[in-house]
Image (cartoon, rainbow, N blue to C red):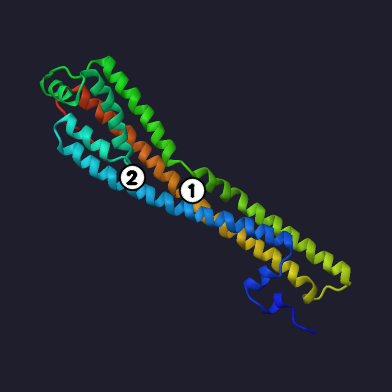
Amino acid sequence: MPANPSLNGGVADLVLSAGPVAKFVLVVLALFSVICWALIVEKWWEFRKIRRESTRFIRVFREARRFSLVYGAAKKHRESPLAQMYLAGGQEVAATFGSGEMADRFLEDSDEGMPLDRLDSINRAMRRAAGSEIERMERYLPFLATTASSAPFIGLFGTVWGIMTSFQSIGAQGSANLAVVAPGISEALIATAAGLGAAIPAVMGYNFFVNRVKYWAGEMDGFALDLLNVFARSTQKPTRVS
């Protein structure tokens, strides 16, 4: 009697010898896994650029004394959420005085700082920018969450189907030896492993990036308060930026 290839071969032979339903489950889980890894790499690179550009912008924000210089630097750091908040608030300031140079003169010469109504407009503009930046940072994270929650159940479906196949083989052949039940059990185990293989990186990536989003949301809240203090005083001397 020839040996069953699913018993003597490796994982590839188990997959190739699986039934059409099991193969469909494995293809779905493979697609989920590939997309998740692509998103994890893309989000990691995105947050790397966010940190790098935010560090550069904060350096300019701390060292520059003129609104126009910081405003110009914010336009160059598109990946930094802090720069985008400054850009949104700076647009309100520039609209109030007509140009960045006029805003420089006011901030340097005024003893009272920005009027309260203009500070309120600046705050609203920065809050809108912060909301947009949070949405940008959260992009694609729902897919990771969906994969983390659904992949184990898809794998479980493949597991149940493999066990059903084993019982059908037992009933059809009237035997419960290893050669009869092994193919179905193999399908079940492969589906389980594939489901976990897709879900584990997804849940780890999701938790990591959600914490990154929360971190930058806190940084934006602190930066908004610092920037309002800057515009409320007569000179641009930021007090705290972490």
Mark 1 residue type = Tyr
Q: Is residue 167 left or right of residue 224?
A: right
Q: Which mark is residue 20?
A: none
Question: Residue 41, position in %: x, y?
Answer: 43, 54
Q: Position of residue 148 (x, y in %)?
A: 56, 50
Left or right: 241, with 201 as reference point: left
| Circle number at residue 206 | 1
Residue drawn at x 87%, y 72% is: 173
- Residue under the point 63% across and 59% down: 27
The answer to whether mark 2 and mark 1 are in CB contact below 8 A is no
Residue farthest front in this picture: 98
Q: Alpha carbon of mark 2 to alpha carbon of mark 1: how far?
A: 17 Å
Q: Which quadrant: the N terminus?
A: bottom right
Nearest the viewer among 7 and 93 is 93
Instruction: Name the residue carrying label 2.
Output: 50
- The picture places residue 231, in percent across and down from the top left corner, at 21, 24
Q: Residues within 10 Å of mark 1 (few under 14, many from 20)?
A: many
Residue at the (23%, 23%) spot, across then down: 94
19 left or right of 42?
right
Mark 2 closeness class: few <14, some 14–19, many ≥20 residues within 10 Å: many
Badge 2 or badge 1: first in the primary sequence: 2
Left or right: 180 as drawn, with respect to 186:
right
Instruction: Please identify the quadrant where the C terminus is shown.
Output: top left
